[in-house]
Amino acid sequence: MFLHNYALADSILGGAHLTFSQVVHHMKSSEAVHYAVSAIGLAMLANMGNASSVAIEARAHYAKALSLTNIALSNKSRALENTTLNAVILLGMFEVMLCGTPKSLDNAQRHIAGAAVLLDVWGSRQVCSLVGIQLFTQLRTDLTHVPDNVRRLSGFVQSCRSEEDSQVEILVGLIAEMADLLADVKGNGMPNPLEAMGRAWVIDGKLEAWSLGLPRRWQYTLRCKPKNNPGLISELAFNDFYHVYPDIWACNIWNYYRNARILLNLLIRDRLLVHLTIQPYPEWKPLLDKTKTTIERCSVDILFSLSFVIAVQFTSLQRGHDQTRPGGYLAAYYVIWPLYVAVSVQTPGTPLWEWAVGRLEYIGRVLGIGQALLMARVMRRELAKVDISSYDYCNSYGSSPRPE
């Protein structure tokens, strides 16, 4: 199940994700990876069929993988093996996949944070090997905070990539700046709202400049769904429009960029709203309007990406005209957080909000990714918002007025 849906063909995205033959090799050489892959596949099946007995079996395979991984980590030489890092990453992926409770998200982040710590014993030569770059890229995408060692290694990886692909490392640096700012605000280490807004504006400006300077390799197009043969796009396209990207990697980086800009502009907007009630300076109103526009545009762009993200038969719907490979399961796995944030800034109960929450439920039930179902429950107020860590980025994230 995992190999068929998450391991890419050897000719696709060799610098971003492990390919089919590489995963098979890791499974053959590491029992921990073998059991972790099996656990993920069973978790997917459990969610698709709502089968509790399969979920129990998935947890048993996960426990075996965890035990074997801990044994490998206790051995210095084995801790340096690619298979050990891969096993730790896969353990975090399992928690996202099964994800019956908010605690699963905490467990997933602990595994990913552990994998990031493991990088401390890696040298720059190891991380710049082909498999090292692939594992590093996958790990970094799963992080909700970018630690110092990952930033340092991003510099080594940037020197190993082509000039076009190195743009990814630049984005990672900017998102790390954003994470630091939001951590300072959350921890009340920056009580001055003007200082917080100033830093957010600077980072947001850098992000916008980054997006405008991207080479053609990363560019996407906006299209309208075909009238005569809408097929799967009818269900997945938002408002009849959808994006087409060069590949999954391009789609992922654009959505993480949009996610970052939404969070930064929410921070700015919330503080502007407070200041406008105290000191209604006329020059601040255009700034408030700009933040609302950015939030809305970025959230809508995330929604426009969903047909490409989720579709598994995209090429056939294009009738051979466009051979771009759709995202499918792997892209859906990485769009969950951006989609969750995009839904969060919409007005609950509106047709758009219902459609977007429905995409989370689609990802959970049809593609078997449990975290998406958990997030949909939060959106429908079946769980408290405080249980989802994305809201930790900004204290007022869910309480301030939404964009008009």
Image: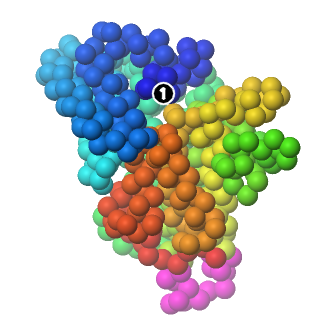
* Three-letter residue code for mark 1: Tyr
Residue situated in front as seen by the camera: 204 or 51 = 51
Left or right: 375 as drawn, with respect to 30: right
Residue drawn where x is 66% and y is 58% of the image: 300
What is the span of residues highlighted in magenta in the rendered image? 273-288
Q: Quadrant of residue 293?
A: bottom right
Which quadrant of the rendered structure holds the C terminus?
A: bottom right
Q: Quadrant of residue 247?
A: top right
Give x and y (percent) for residue 263.
Answer: 50, 60
Give x and y (percent) for residue 217.
Answer: 70, 30
Left or right: 357 as drawn, with respect to 246: left
Specify whether residue 377 is in view: yes
Give x and y (percent) for residue 78.
Answer: 21, 15
The residue that disc 1 covers is: 6
**Label 1 packing within 10 angstroms: few (<14), some (14-19), many (20+):** many
Residue drawn where x is 60% and y is 60% of the image: 355
Residue drawn where x is 36% and y is 72% of the image: 191
Residue situated in front as seen by the camera: 180 or 375 = 375
Question: Is residue 279 covered in magenta?
Answer: yes
